[in-house]
Image (spheres, rainbow, N blue to C red):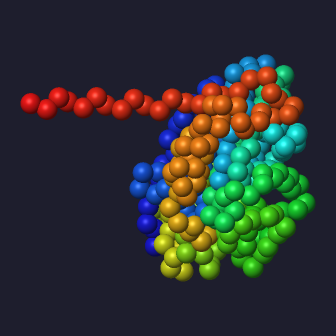
Amino acid sequence: MIELVIPARRKDLGGFEVGRVLPFAQRRMVGPFTFFDHMGPVTLPPNIPRTTDVRPHPHIGLATVTYLLDGELTHRDSLGVEQVIRPGEVNWMTAGRGISHSERFEGMRAHGGFMDGIQAWVALPEADEEMAPAFDHYGADALPRFGEPGVEARLIAGEAYGVKNAVKTRSPMFYVHADLAAGASLGLPEGHPERAAFVARGRIEVEGQEYGVGQMVVFGPQAGPALRALEASSVLLLGGEPLGPRHIWWNFVSSSRERIEQAKADWKAGRIPLPTLDNQEFIPLPEDPPKPTPEPMS
């Protein structure tokens, strides 16, 4: 049963535009997924300006999960990690009590090219929100492939369709990339109370309704309908166990509003270190909108 359809809203990150799906006013999270950005699809021109890059910025209380269908990004963080990510690989950065990182188009800068991918944030369980930050990279060979006629799928993280992999997760979840040939069908993973499908390419049909690129279809916990591809399509399936409400402000996620305020103060005061190999610039803390001046009482 379909509970909600969420459209991607275009958002400029300061030179590079993404389609933001989560959080959404009517649905803040799907399982532990609290943030979901579609990076592209876009053809970048040669000599990509550095203003298109995502400069160093901080996170707490979450893991960022970067997965590309096309293109290339260079990740650097305050643990000293420098890692290029390419299609079919996973960068899993656990922010815990605090980390900063940058994402740059260095491998594509001179010649440009096609960019298409997803960055998701997975909230950490309360017991892990203040864990030490960590970074893990998984090559394409670490992500098991499986399928059926007309369907080729890769397990990005978690457990789905009886398949597991070695990606370190902190709560029950699933994240799958599925390519469907025209006319092919795929049922949703079972055993998870919250589930969704995001159309990255092509068009699909669910319960007689058509959905296209940039739409996330959120399902209830019932057995659920199958997805049928109306043309060759790429779909990201995601969900898992809910972790409870989270406060989200800028790049910070926490079960505690006070912890968000501390993270804001820490970044502003320079207490969260910059990436070791990318420390010459950073994104300043956004200013809170001014509170309205109360009308004088008569």
- Which residue sits furthest left? 298
Measured as percent of width and height from the top left, residue 199 is found at: 59, 54
Measured as percent of width and height from the top left, residue 166 is found at: 84, 67
* Image quarter in which the C terminus is found: top left
Picture quadrant where residue 142 is located: bottom right
Picture quadrant where residue 230 is located: bottom right
Tell me the residue at 88%/55% (across/down).
Answer: 139
Q: Nearer the viewer, residue 265 or 287?
A: 265
Picture quadrant where residue 228 is located: bottom right
Relative side of 83 to 133, left or right: right
Tell me the residue at 58%/50% (across/down).
Answer: 259
The answer to whether residue 207 is seen in the rendering is no
Measured as percent of width and height from the top left, residue 85 is found at: 83, 44
Measured as percent of width and height from the top left, residue 184 is found at: 65, 67
Reply above or below: 267 against 126: above
Q: Nearer the viewer, residue 140 or 281?
A: 281
Tell me the residue at 48%/72% (across/down).
Answer: 220
Relative side of 164 to 124, left or right: right
Tell me the residue at 71%/73% (across/down).
Answer: 160
Reply above or below: 189 against 279: below
The answer to whether residue 58 is seen in the rendering is yes
Q: Nearer the viewer, residue 268 or 16?
A: 268
